[in-house]
Amino acid sequence: MTDSVQTNLLDASDISIQQINNTLGVLTQHDIDFADLYFQSSQHEAWVLEDGIIKNGSYNIERGVGVRAISGEKTGFAYSDDINATALLDAAKAARSIADHTDVTTPIVKPFKTVQNDMKYMANNPLLAMAEAEKIAILKATDSYIRGQAPNASQVSVSLTGVYEEIMVIGTDGTWATDIRPLIRLNCSVLLEEGERRERGGAGAGGRYAYSFFQSDVNGIPFYQSLADEALHMARVNMEAVAAPAGNMPVVLGAGWPGVLLHEAVGHGLEGDFNRKGASTFSGRIGEQVAAKGVTVVDDGTMADRRGSLTIDDEGTPSQYNVLIEDGILKGYMQDKHNAALMGVAPTGNGRRESYSHLPMPRMTNTYMLNGEHSQEEMFASIKQGVYAPNFGGGQVDITSGKFVFSTSEAYLIEDGKVTTPIKGATLIGNGPEVMGKISMIGNDLALDRGVGVCGKDGQSLPVGVGQPSLKVDEITVGGTA
Amino acid sequence: MQMKQQLQDIQDAVAEVLALAKAKGATEAEASMSKVQGIAVSARMQEVETVEFTNDGGLGISLYVGNKKGSASTADLSHAALELTVSKAIEIAKYTEEDPCNGIADKALLATDIPDCDLYHPEELDTQAGLALALAAEKYALDADTRVTNSDGASYNANIGCRVYGNSHGFLAGYPSSRYSLSCVVIGQDGDDMQRDYAYTVDRKANRLLSAESIGKEAAAQAVARLGAEKVNTGKYPVIFDKQIASSIFGHLVSAISGGSLYRKSSFLLNSIDTQILPHWLTIQEQPHLPQALASTPFDHEGVATIDRTIVEQGILGLYLMTTYSGRKMGLPSTGHAGGVHNWQVSTTHTDQAALLKEMGTGVLVTELMGQGVNGVTGDYSRGAAGYWVENGVIQYPISEFTIASNLKDMFMNIVGISADIETRGSVFTGSLLISEMQIAGE
């Protein structure tokens, strides 16, 4: 861990260790179990190309501190968009109002211990690591590549975004932790026109690394070209698409981003807060069969450079490789400190928050299913009438009833064991545990998504990863029109 | 009073930022700044759960050096941060390219007198009073039915703030507003079957919120009503969108007739002005200055005057929604729609939902939509849903885990009725809406 974060967040704001101790002391004058301070500073930039020109650029800065106090199941929270000693103290006084004043003089603040963990990504600022002219060159090259490949493109847009964030967590449990989190993303979108018909294709990728990643070689071509090819492919496939079927049928899901299935069907339902409250369809089911045999699902914050990866979570807990479901059996939930303490288990490195002005909650990192042994060909061959869906848009889940949806953005009919005609986008709907029980073949081609996942919960958005090998689901409802 | 001073301070800050932009070389500039203070409190299972003190603010600036644009924003409102924000925007404009459509709004379209939409009704931010309301709402829900066994909590939010917009034509105006809400989410249980549902009330005036009793009882009734849901057979049926979700249909219309989608050719309603896109009986009026309404605004995000307009008359589309930029791309003036639409009033045909159910006879009443399966380019529509099976105009039993699909062009033309018991908690005021036929995929 670097001390530069402490220098930038505390020293630069004239916050001394003494003032930190004072603040924690003020908090613990009330009857609280735990309190923490979360300092954050972030820079965000975006460059947008449209109509062949660099149309806009934007830059956002955010800096602030959030103070949280916990007493039993109760949480008090306040924050300030200005880091200074007075604001910190005011926030502490507001947050501690969740509990009554106490005369117990024994300080509950434990001696600080710096949290150590191997860094899962670089500590550099991607915004500064590349000159503006070179960032723009990536957008221009992507645009001209697409226009060269598709003269019938009526719209091409490309955007490049980067975030550099420093965070620091100090807790009454002795937590003293800092992290530097870069995050970049490249997106492209193309609209093709043929006669009266118009179809869009899009692709995006990113992770916790430098922009130069987008220039790097992938199988002999620059990465941005492979991304553009993906967008063009989607638009071209959709140009030929016919109405999707309606009803229950077998579906083969592709590897990678279709792992959004796991995120919705099981991921959210295994977050600790819902399970502590008994609000999830998975509540109280540890040790039970909740998916077909062979299904192993993990949440892994430790993967190098991934969009959903964390060196430490937003409570200073080192990220972990957590097995959620093993061979179909429910093994554990994802926890933050508060829910872990109330459920009598250890935090799992899943305590995350959108910013200093939001409270942490149990959230996913990179959620994926481990490999099985089947090939896609075996899956197709086993199906007479069905759907093959290699790409999806977003999804949503009702964790209480277990119902979830996700929508295809590229899909095909399977007829007599063969992938045939492309079909239009359709929403798939099912019940999490039921669909997980209907997985009959697991592929040997595990892939993670390209780094575009955004997860929303209680109004807070966070970057996440998803992944899976190809899967055959024996039956799920396909919401087409034919 | 205090707010007057705060508004003045923010206007001064915006003026300073605009002056700074000019000094640093911007030929045109616009900036907006907001500051909102609030509380968010929640209770769960009759215990206090969270007490949050919120204090959000931000400044956003877009400036132009000739026809080149740069934007920057900050949540940190210190003088140093404001200065850095302006410098960053100037820096960015060195790298963006000339676009003749760029620039702030035409001076002639800016609001000249600022109508008072009566949006500001301050109350003391009292966490104890808020908690009392949340606790009461949840208690009514838990006591309403023995099958309400669990709760995801009830919460009360209060926000008071102001927004200021200024640009280099000399426009500088702001207004304060308030917003209060009470919501409750409970879980009904019957054996292994668990269903959640919610109810909420939101208003500019705290004393006009619905009572804790009505919110608690509504949440309980809705959660319990969903228990024992069955599946529905795959087929084509008429569909009623409950008023709580019917506005989403008009939300898709808003996207399709917005300048940003149109100039990008990413809409299924290109070249549709003066054509029939909705049934002949359907008219949509926009009233941006409706007193105390949630989507009222005296001017749009670019300072352009908002005015009463007819969007659709007797099914004929009369207006595309333009911002300054999209308007210039299309050779049209801004219509004051930077930032969205303002209080659309959709015409109605039936007295209430019961009358609409009768009109439908047998079909599906949808009360919840899931997922994002809407393609704005083609209008193709496929979403997850839950609701009720209806026979002979009477609700029979809850249904879930099905999809509804069609194309929005057809859905618009196939609207056969809208009930007069309208939903007013969003930017589109509409009742429940009956579409003559959609494809349902279920069992």
Image (spheres, coloured by chain):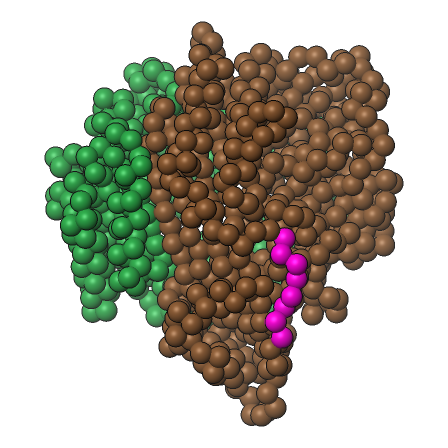
Residue at (42% x, 72% y) in the render: A11
> What x and y, as percent, mark residue A253?
72, 29
- Quadrant where the C terminus of chain B lies? top right
Please, what is the dominant secondary structure of the magenta stretch? Answer: loop
Please tell me whether residue A178 is drawn above or below residue A247 in the rendered image. below
The quadrant holding residue B345 is top left
> What x and y, as percent, mark residue A280?
70, 52
Please tell me whether residue A262 is drawn above or below residue B331 in the rendered image. below
Chain in green (letter): B
Q: Does residue B364 belong to the magenta stretch?
A: no
User: Looking at the image, which is closer to me, A338 or A66?
Assistant: A66
Give the residues in magenta.
A113-120
The quadrant holding residue B326 is top left
- B160 relative position to A368: left or right: left
Residue at (76% x, 31% y) in the render: A445
> What x and y, as percent, mark residue A276?
70, 62
- A119 relative position to A6: left or right: right
- Quadrant where the N terminus of chain B lies? bottom left
Residue at (70% x, 50% y) in the render: A300
Q: Does residue A117 belong to the magenta stretch?
A: yes
Q: Is residue B235 visible?
A: no
- Chain A drawing hue: brown
User: Looking at the image, which is closer to me, A111 or B219?
Assistant: A111
Furthest residue to the top? A195
